[in-house]
Amino acid sequence: MSSTFRVWVRDLSMGVRFALAGGREGWMRTTLTALGVGLGVALLIVTTAVPSALAAREHRSDARTDMTFGSVIPKTDATLVVGHVDTTYRGESIRGRLYQPEGPKTPLPPGVSAYPKPGEALVSPKLKQILDSADGKLLRERVDAKIVGTLGDDALVSPGELVYYAGADSLKPTGYPVERIDKFGTPNPMQEAMDPVLVLLTLIVFIVLLMPVGVFIAAAVRFGGERRDRRLAALRLIGADGRMVRRIAAGEALAGSLFGLVLGTGFFLAARQLAAKVELERVSVFPHDLDPSPLLALLVAVAVPAAAVGVTLFALRGVVIEPLGVVRTAKPSRRRLWWRLLLPVGGLALLYPMIGQGRDNGSFNEYMVTGGVVLLLVGITALLPWLVEFVVSRLGGGSVSWQLAVRRLQLSSGTAARMVNGIAVAVAGAIALQMLFAGVEGDYTKETGQDLSRAQMSVNVRTGPEAGRQTEAILKGLGETQGVKGAQGFTTASAGEKAKDAQDYVSVTVGTCEALQTVAKLPSCKDGDAFVVKDDSEYEQSYPGMTKPGKQLYINPADSAVKQRGKTYPWKIPADVQHGTARTSPMGGPMGGIMVTPSAFPAAAQAELGGQVYIQIDGSVPDVREYVRAATSKVDPFAEAQAMQDIEVKGRFASVRTGLFVGAACVMLLIGASLLVSQLEQLRERKKLLSALVAFGTRRRTLSLSVFWQTAVPIGLGLVLAGVVGLALGSVLLKMTGQTISVDWTSVAAMTGIGAGVVLAVTLLSLPPLLRLMRPEGLRTE
């Protein structure tokens, strides 16, 4: 056993020496192999660092949590009053906090060494950049404080996050958005676990993104096959046996893979330093977050060289290497189809038992899912060489460029298939993922019911002292705001039959006649009127006695206010109360209960009612939403001005979808770069042939077109096969999640078009080196 090991070490070492001592030709071959492997290794290392990056982001997010989730904290010398003033600027979320320490022992939030004083603020680097720019004028009106420093990395989830902490001295904790806390990092009791379908989506995303990487690495270690065959024949001539030359060939591939590991590590370290400056789909990470797991990194370091040796030995299994040449230049035996079909069939067999499982029948078996999807996608790499050989063997005459391309493909169809295997796998996976996302999207997106034809923004005014007056002030400010076409405001409360511990409540809405008529059909209206508005889901149906004329009720401005102040307001329903019918509000859903105009309601109670404002804006006015938020913030920084939307997407589904977009962008870059390296390697292999054709008078245009056809034919076949496998995989995944099979042909065409576009771009980029190679000087031999 030890002697066998020594033989393997000797032969592999000899192959490594051949790779390094082969002169310019050998170095070029090894460099191209290392470059192709390095690109894949870099992405693999990034993937091994993804779990740690996500964990670091989540840890920082949890560590800075400053909410009580309903708990009441008494004041001490170690408590802090927090005001939540989150906002949005040009589509980007901004995390805003007002901090008011209540003693010397108040805990500090992560990333902060001292609290800012009232009127001062600490901001994130990205937010400071925006505030200092000319585009930050509207935002500076909301962050109305002197910038005295920047927040540390521990205060931010990502380097591109927009965050500011401002000092305050007049906050009164009455419940969210102004709360008292005694520590940071309180866990969220309402956080929900990912459901099985999202777990399946995440797993499929990782498989689909990593499979093309493995395919490209396997193709890269086989660069320089034809020249290597001639060297192996020479070794046979001087006495090496067949097994020895195969091990030597594996050693050459091992050298390229080892250099690829070094290059890949270098690419990763360079990309890591740029990570903070690159933002994809508004996602960025700190360089120190990209910390690969040692175990996974070790797995990559071992698996890549082992795969290089294994792939080379597998590729040479049917090659006869003799002293006078390699029997690859003769017509190879026809590829068999039956065993290639076993891979996708085996994949379907693993996935079939989970059909119909959905999210109601427990979690999916992750090992069966991984095995099934991998077998289906690997089946493409097995079927494509057979398909290319089957088709090109039947192609015939045409133009000179076409005939040159077809003849080349007939002689080396396997090489052509290897070039496009990665793209075919990536496109098949993308089609399947697109089908799965489209199929389950309805479960994670819902119509909000908001009527954007009646209002495009809304403002929530927190309940508390002065809330009613603030609502009026906001309406007045909006009336003077550029781009605002109109605004209607309401104040709301609940009313019970008892001053304390009332069990039954009816809703009360206070507003002008114009405002009330937007949410109710009223017979007539003037200031001083009151109405009982019927609604099929409202309280007066269950408690009709509560809405009788002259009924004594007690107004409760807010539960938190009642708890802290024990304050309610007695109010009798007017004797001349009228009746109306509820209409759907702009926010969706009917508003019923009791509706009154301001003069028919106690002024003291109205001053403390929470407000709701609906705003109509002119979308053609640039930054009109920012004007609205600025006007609202001037009155009350806690008033939430939000853009209304007709569709709402669940956060975790959106996160998985964003992760797919980011990963797909990285994989497409890898595909393009690796394919370009592969194309250049093939052109280098045929340098003498191209030079000979030019010397005999072949036009360069003809040769350029032949190179294009040599790429276009296999990629066309690969995309057809990818479409079939992608549709099959997508259909199975949809049935697994309990969804109806449907195909978005536009998306399928888009995925296929992207793959074809990458090939076209690579072909265009390879033209300059092709033109340089097509010179008679290429016939010179040293």
Image (cartoon, rainbow, N blue to C red):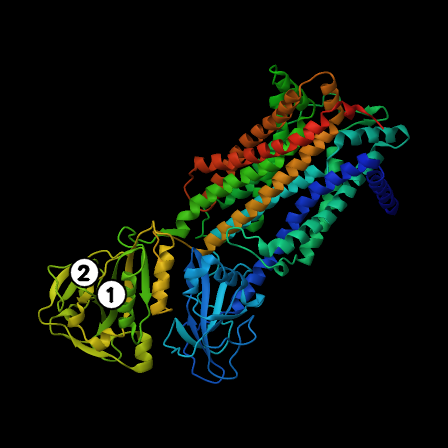
Number of callouts? 2
Q: Dot 1 surroundings within 10 Å: few (below 14), some, or many (20 or more)?
A: many
Q: Amino acid at mark 1?
A: Phe
- Up the image or down, 280 lies above or below 14; here it is below
Name the residue that disc number 2 marks: 514
Name the residue that disc number 1 marks: 490
Q: Dot 2: what SS?
A: helix
Q: Dot 1: what SS?
A: strand
Q: Dot 2 surroundings within 10 Å: few (below 14), some, or many (20 or more)?
A: few
- Left or right placement of residue 572 versus residue 223 in this view: left
- Left or right placement of residue 528 versus residue 32 in this view: left
- For residue 390, say whether it is visible: yes
Residue at image position (31%, 75%) is 464
Q: Amino acid at mark 2?
A: Glu
Residue 67 in percent (x, y) is at 45, 71
Residue 664 in percent (x, y) is at 55, 45
- For residue 368, say whether it is visible: no
Q: Which mark is residue 578?
A: none
Residue 624 in percent (x, y) is at 35, 55
- Up the image or down, 112 lies above or below 37; here it is below
Residue at image position (57%, 75%) is 113
Task: Name the quadrant containing residue 563.
Answer: bottom left
- Left or right placement of residue 657 versus residue 329 in this view: left
Q: Quadrant of the C terminus?
A: top right
Q: Residue furthest left?
A: 576
- Up the image or down, 502 lies above or below 721; here it is below
Comes first in the chain, label 1 or label 2? 1
Residue 11 in percent (x, y) is at 85, 40
